[in-house]
Amino acid sequence: MSAGRTGHAGRAGDAQPVLEVQDLRVELDTPRGTASIVNGLSYSVAPGETVAVVGESGSGKSVSVMALLGLLPAHARVGGRALFRGRDLLAMGEPELRQVRGDGIGMVFQDPMTSLNPVLTVGRQITEGLLAHGRVAGGRQARERAAQLLADVGLPDPRAALGRFPHELSGGMRQRVVIAIALSGDPALLIADEATTALDVTVQAQILELVDGLRAEHGTGVVWITHDLGVVAGTADRVLVLYGGRCVEDGGVDDVFERPAHPYTQGLLGALPQLHDGPGGRRSELVAIAGAPPPPTDLPPGCVFHPRCPVRGDERCALEQPPLVPVALGARPDGTAVPHRAATFHDTAPGTGGAGS
Amino acid sequence: MSDVLVRARGLQVHFPVRARGLRRRRTGEVRAVDGVDLEIRRGETLGLVGESGCGKSTLGNALLRLVEPTGGRVEFDGTDVTALRARELRALRRRAVMVFQDPYASLDPRATVGQTVAEPLRVHGLHPGAAARAARVAELLELVGLDPAAAPRYPHEFSGGQRQRVGIARALAGEPDFVVCDEAVASLDVSVQAQVLNLLRELQQRLGLTYLFVSHDLAAVRHVSDRIAVMYLGRVVEVGDADAVSTRPQHPYAQALLSAVPLPDPAAERRRERIVLRGEVPSATRVPSGCRFRTRCPRAFAPCPDVDPALQEAEPGHRAACHLHGVVGTPVPAEQRGPA
Amino acid sequence: MSAAGTAAGSAAGAAGAVRVRPPRGRFTSALRLLLSSPRTLFALVVVVGVVLLALLDEQVAPTGYNEVDVAQRLLAPGADHWFGTDDLGRDVLSRVVLGAAVSLQVGAVAVGFSLVCGVTAGLLAGYYGRWLDTVLMRLMDVLFAFPAMLLAIAVIAVLGPGTTNAMIAIGLTYTPVFARVTRAAVLGVKESVYVRASRSVGASDARLLLRHVLPNAAPPIIVQTSVSLAFAVLAEAALSFVGLGTQPPAPSWGRMLSEGRGHLEDAWWMAVFPGLAIVLLVLAFNLLGDGLRDVLDPQQRSALEAARSRSRRARRRGGRS
């Protein structure tokens, strides 16, 4: 595991990673039995790096970040370590975590209304955080700073917006406000969980651009949780593909999209309808993956993907979980090296572009 | 027999906006669908795309009169649907059906899969008798790729993709001609979505169905459609062959929309130029005069506030409602003209 | 691979993924689950017991309901009179047994009346809305605005006192409650996508109401029914208490309670045993209502089934080790 990580030294020279997750595990007791939602997830995020965590429903992608932030129900069992600037988030108590959530880590969720208080003005919600964390001297300064933040996230007429209530804003504008609040603490790490899923594509494009600009400017590390491979392709440096609570493939975004090594990643890319391909390709069959993802209460033995796997080339598939091993020496879009790894027994002569082939 | 199965002419769906309080005075209206002309040809798939609030879903519902149109007319196979009485309308519902978005909400949790699929049979008196009905249900379940033994089970025992198959089986039970797929794959996971898209297409070929595929997902629409119509604020602003619309969009809105779709190809994403639109979609209670896109259009010019553009041919089989292709349309009366 | 080949492959693959257990009869599985919970089992035993007592009445009661024996008055519970005797020397046990019929009848008929009227009104008001909603619900508001007791007394004033009239009176006072509960549930259900989906395939209003809206609006109505059954038994007691319900010397639990009130200090058993009977029956109705609501919901039912089979497996495993 550590051998893999030395390669991740980060794009900004040898900077320490902002976040380092080691062997994260989450279990939850449900009426239908114990759900193993996250099963040994490890990754790190360098300053200024965008790591996308992709997966379908039930893959554990959202739970994995909720666990980091201490947002899971109390009866969830969380194991492993998650070092944020060297301190283990999973070992922190609630007061400490609250400090970190407001001050070091910003969060943006799918539905902006879950993070906004409907009865407080936008201005109040931003200044409250600023004052609570002692980032400004007083009320007047807080309002100045809040207006500045709203301007940064591209809200038209930020001063007027301070006095508005969340319901007076459109979905896209609300999400901008949530991002402004997330950024108010100058976070070293921004976690976006399906942050643009509820938005229209034109608004989504604006938000993606906004976050990428802020990342480049402040060197914020970004964890972008999504099910949308299109969003990943446009924003991420590195991708983790989650299935059944495990990382089945990771690597630079170009490596994973152009030379997917795991049959699941190949399947996902093949299952995606294409907007731009040849006239003959339009009506071609999508290569669907049979079946549905397993519920976390009922994970199959062996490789989590083997019941749906079109390859299943090895008898070990049904018996043991393949380890995540390097399949190629890969790179991020900026050229820095990062290993391309996959958890499969399938002899990985990486396919060329999953889609349409 | 005409080759047009469904035709909308000047179709309008306006919802009243009422003031709060006792008298609930009518203070305005939401013009969800505001004068749509559309033809759907026999055996084709027409994709209907647009962003949330553009009226695409209302249009789909209005074509089936699941929402009452407030103006214009809808013809289905030559009959005026808007003039049908309740009993005749129910009979039409055998031939024109809908597949809904959310497979978790669209199946009655207290009805078994078999009861759900058998409902159109009971309603329209098809395959009478318990044994004949059960046989037909089994046939339908098999048709959509489910085990016929699933009939006595309840929806919650199935995954999202399987439930959507049940919804499709229900829709097809009465052997319809026309199916409106209203965001039918939007809430499914990518891998499952592909199964359902393939199934829809296979069924179309096998049964000769005509589809209206309503979706916000341009890639999915492009994949399944023969032709695509783009909606903005209650109007169809562009319609044409799927290839033409997705590769050579003519309306500035369609151009912006297409440029915003994220592509699952990192290299292509880095090369792309996005057209970022100004501002927000105006409220459907206050539609701008003339061209309704003009307030956000990067290429708006003199005639836009004064003339409501009509759909006109930009190239053969490809029409757009934009003055850049010649100023054609209904002039706006002077007193209604807003600021340019 | 040809396109057709892929299509067949994906369809077959998907079909293979649907694993279906052979289904058990819905009714038997519901019944079995109902019996598997100790609480509902207890409730069922109590209710069935009371029903049996009511049916058998004179065959199980040690004496008749009005065998006055002044020499035996106010005897404490003992071997001869298990529940003691009242101020007229009548056997309390016999009167409790014989009163069961009255209490049950009042509960069933009164609640049945309000259930039918209230649910119908609520269903129509909630589903059709507009003027029908306004008219029906204002009517219910008028009924509701009268204090329940006052309304019942008014009804009895018109119809005259007696058990049957008391039942009608009680039924009338509960009607608006059922109408409101039903209407609220219907408002939620009628907007659901599955109702729209059924309409989209041509289902008539009657079919939508009876096959989709009512079953899905049922859980709060079931709970309300069990609560109302309990209250009806108490209401009959109250009416009898003021002399408007069951007429003496006929026994009803409510009458007995009110007669025993004067002797709480010297003969506690006169009030306590009928009181206990009321508590037991009311409790049983409530538990039964909760149990029914759960097993009538397919999702709850499978969750219960899963939990049960898991605990059985765990027990087996425990037994082996």
Image (cartoon, rainbow, N blue to C red):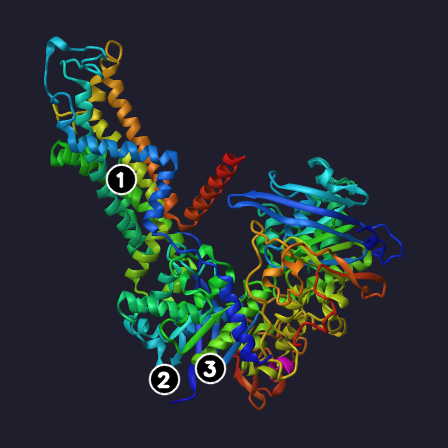
Name the quarter where the N terminus of chain B is drawn.
bottom left
**Chain at numbered mark 2:** B
The boundaries of the magenta stretch are B244-250
Q: Where is residue A6? Give x, y as percent.
A: 85, 54
Residue at the image point whose x is 36% and y is 52% from the top = C24
In the picture of the structure, the residue carrying the numbered disc 3 is B40
Quadrant of the image containing the C terminus of chain B? bottom right
Q: Secondary structure at mark 1?
A: helix
Q: Which mark is residue C174?
A: 1
Q: What amino acid is labelled 2 in the image?
A: Gly
Amino acid type of the residue tagged 1 in the rendering: Tyr
Look at the numbered disc 2 and give the secondary structure of its residue: loop
Quadrant in which residue C22 is drawn: bottom left
Q: Position of residue C106 (x, y in %)?
A: 20, 35
C132 relative to A126, above or below: below
* Disc on res. B78: 2
For mark 2, does the 10 Å Cα neighbourhood hold few (<14), some (14 to 19), or many (20 or more) residues?
A: few
Categorize mark 1 by other alpha carbons within 10 Å: few (<14), some (14-19), many (20+).
many
Q: What is the chain letter for disc 1? A: C
Q: Quadrant of residue B228?
A: bottom right
